[in-house]
Image (cartoon, rainbow, N blue to C red):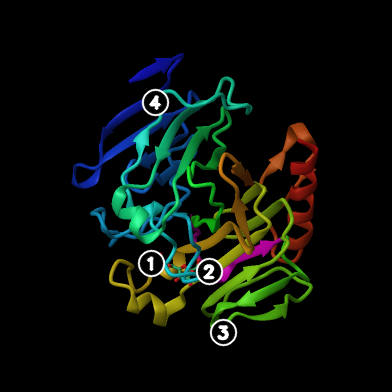
């Protein structure tokens, strides 16, 4: 366990004795990532409030993926290919990467852990490509959570490979019927409920009254998830990930999932930074680097930045506009 000034990176045992890494920040925020799946399963703010959703019925036992947190969908998103749904990265045991190649990013004074996944002989039988997937999970001094993925083609046969990818993030929300997503208005999306046909989103925030399963295309860097009841907004900042999947299973689909509580759909929403519409192709030696950063903004009076953001349904859109302006200025 390494600690500096009360920040810490601790390797310990989690559920069912699975290895996990705990990151702790001075301000009290924390994050946890299991080596199984390279799977972030917890992100808590300075008050110890859990910000990610993990099902109470999640099965922490290979080969089943953990239901919730931030599953890594690689080398295939969903069933868009010949592999099992969402690929196999989330079903494999990763290692702590103790000697990663230099990582030019702003992780100074931040607490982080580097994980590494390489294919096994078994994996090469189902996906005949050598790769190194390096994941850095970083907790910032203000409790922001950043995931950076670096995927390199290490084929020695000269062959390129092509993949799709998503950070399948499950956010914890108070009541899905009181949640709005801003930033995806007027964009095209593929509707998984209608054979992935292409539609155009209306001009207002996305709200939820039934199952939603959509792949929004060419989305902006920043997407906001406004939780009315908890008076807070999640802000996703993404680099290199043009698409965004929005998913809530609602009641019927919830009942059909054995590792998901019947009523849990009310308290979660997946908004997933992704690269799906245009699959990524890497030649041997090429590396693809992408990032998602998650922040929390409270809908309170922000003295220092003079953004008076009062909670009110009527001006929720204005609220989020101000939040997105605030984010772009900081
Ligand atoms: O990201 C949305 C989605 O593709 C949905 O269609 C639903 O299948 C969800 O992922 C969960 O997939 P999983 O394989 O984790 O059960």
**How far across and how far down the image is residue 264, in percent?**
39, 67
Q: Residues within 10 Å of mark 4 (few under 14, many from 20)?
A: many
List the residue tagged with mark 2.
Answer: 247
Q: Earlier in the sequence, mark 1 or mark 2?
A: 1
The mark found on residue 84 in the picture is 1
Examine the rendered structure and indicate whether residue 214 appears above or below residue 219: below
Q: Is residue 175 magenta?
A: yes
In the image, the residue with mark 3 has its CB under 8 Å from the nearest atom of ligand 1: no
List the residue tagged with mark 4.
Answer: 9
Q: Residue at x 44, y 30 (%)?
A: 113
Q: Secondary structure under badge 2?
A: strand
List the residue tagged with mark 3.
Answer: 195
Q: Secondary structure under badge 4?
A: strand
Query: What is the distance, in whole Å, between disc 1 and disc 3 at their CAs?
Result: 19 Å
Query: What is the distance, in whole Å, between disc 4 and disc 2 at their CAs?
Result: 32 Å
Query: What is the distance, in whole Å, between disc 1 and disc 2 at their CAs?
Result: 19 Å
Q: Secondary structure under badge 3?
A: loop
In the image, the residue with mark 2 has its CB under 8 Å from the nearest atom of ligand 1: yes
Q: Residue at x 74, y 66 (%)?
A: 314
**How far across and how far down the image is residue 60, in percent?**
26, 53
**How far across and how far down the image is residue 270, in percent?**
52, 62
């Amino acid at each position: 366990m390494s600690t500096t000034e009360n920040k810490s990176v601790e390797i310990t045992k989690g559920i069912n004795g699975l290895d996990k890494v705990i990151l702790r920040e001075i301000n009290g925020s924390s994050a946890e990532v299991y080596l199984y799946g390279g799977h972030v399963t917890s992100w808590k703010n300075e008050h110890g409030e859990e910000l990610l959703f993990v099902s109470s019925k999640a099965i922490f036992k290979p080969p089943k993926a953990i239901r919730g947190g931030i599953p890594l969908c690689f080398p295939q998103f969903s069933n868009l290919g010949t592999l099992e749904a969402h690929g196999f990265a989330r079903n494999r045991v990763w290692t702590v990467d103790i000697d990663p190649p230099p990582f030019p990013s702003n992780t100074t004074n931040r607490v982080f852990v580097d994980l590494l996944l390489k294919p096994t002989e078994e994996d090469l039988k189902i996906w005949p490509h050598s790769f190194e997937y390096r994941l850095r999970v970083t907790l910032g001094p203000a409790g922001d959570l950043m995931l950076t993925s670096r995927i390199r083609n290490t084929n020695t046969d000269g062959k390129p490979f092509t993949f799709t990818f998503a950070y399948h993030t499950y956010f914890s929300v108070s009541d899905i019927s009181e949640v709005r997503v801003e930033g995806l208005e007027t964009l095209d999306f593929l509707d998984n409920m209608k054979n992935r046909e292409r539609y155009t989103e209306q001009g207002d925030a996305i709200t939820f009254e039934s199952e939603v399963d959509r792949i929004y295309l060419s989305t902006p860097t920043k997407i906001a998830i406004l939780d009315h009841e908890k008076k807070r907004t999640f802000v996703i900042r993404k680099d290199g990930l043009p698409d965004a999947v929005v998913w809530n299973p609602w009641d019927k689909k919830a009942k059909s999932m054995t590792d998901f509580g019947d009523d849990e759909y009310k308290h979660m929403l997946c908004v997933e930074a992704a690269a799906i519409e245009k699959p990524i192709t890497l030649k041997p030696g090429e590396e693809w680097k992408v990032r998602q950063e998650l922040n929390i903004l409270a809908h309170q009076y922000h003295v220092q930045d003079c953004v008076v953001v009062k909670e009110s349904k009527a001006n929720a859109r204005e609220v989020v506009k101000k939040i997105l302006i605030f984010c772009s200025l900081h």
